[in-house]
Amino acid sequence: MSNNIDAVLFDLDGTLWDSAQAVANSWNEALKELGINKVLTKDDIGSVMGLLMNDIADKLFSEFDDEKRDEILKKCCGVENKYIEEHGGILFDNLEETLTELSSKYKLAIISNCQAGYIEAFLKAHKLSQYFCDFENPGRTGLPKGENIKLVIERNNFKNVVYVGDTQSDYNATKVAGVRFIYAKYGFGDVQDYQYSIDSIDSLPKYLETL
């Protein structure tokens, strides 16, 4: 193993796949069911990928009061999980082949700022569960990403990990957790002051050998 790395941790949206259109479709279904005359686009969803759910609600549904935002968010997330599980999203090029190679050398896990059930829907839709030993999200723990990274590290007894993500909040979370960050430049975000980066997910295995 390169440089004694024993685990590679991943963000999900913008790092392993692009689910923006699928999420937009599902949220529009939910809004229609609620009788709300509002249509969200793929770009709307892409602009909030990586944010905590409450921050997403504040940005996309600012015209509503807090109680209504909570109602909308709960409905959207429920419809979304079922839709994602059935329809999936767009996997980045050669993802499964990359996970196959990585999982032969490292333990893999996903830590994402999403609702409970979303990561499970991703794994089930694309039949990728066998590649990951663990996952976590604030929907399940109530913790921010940095703390969830630490939680996954502690319960798996990982010693030397890297985290791959595409947003500034991902980078900030790795600072909290005290782990190295690899910027997925092909994703949704714009990260400042990063040290390591990749231009595609399938370049990661060889890149890890250089660390």
Image (cartoon, grey):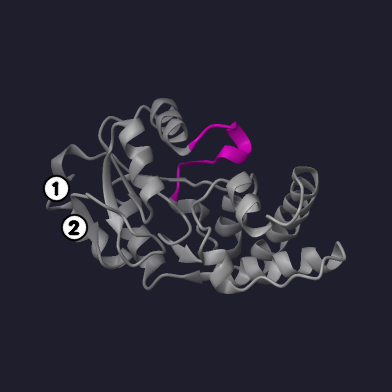
> In the image, 146: left or right of 181?
right
> In the image, 104: left or right of 37?
left
> Residue 16: x percent and y percent?
43, 61
Dot label at residue 207? 2
Residue closest to the far front: 63
Q: Which residue occupies 38% across, 60% down? A: 189
> Residue 95: x percent and y percent?
39, 66
Dot label at residue 172? none
Q: Secondary structure at mark 1?
A: loop
Q: Which residues are magenta?
A: 132-144
Q: Which residue occupies 40% across, 59% down? A: 15
Instruction: Using the rendered view, name the quadrant where residue 150 is placed.
Output: top left
Q: Which amino acid, mark 1?
A: Leu
- Residue 141 lies in magenta, yes or no? yes
Q: Which residue occupies 28% across, 36% down? A: 179
Q: Which residue occupies 35% across, 31% down? A: 176
Q: Secondary structure at mark 2?
A: helix
Q: Which amino acid, mark 2?
A: Tyr
Q: CA distance from mark 2 to mark 1?
A: 7 Å
Circle 1: is it few (<14), some (14-19), or many (20+) Cα within 10 Å? few
Residue closest to the far left: 210
> Would residue 9 be seen by someone viewing this image from the given angle?
no
> In the image, 37: left or right of 139?
right
Q: State the residue position of label 1.
A: 211
Q: Nearer the viewer, residue 156 or 164?
A: 164
Q: Tell me whether circle 2 and circle 1 mark residues in contact (CB < 8 Å).
A: yes
> Would residue 59 be seen by someone viewing this image from the given angle?
yes
Circle 2: is it few (<14), some (14-19), or many (20+) Cα within 10 Å? some
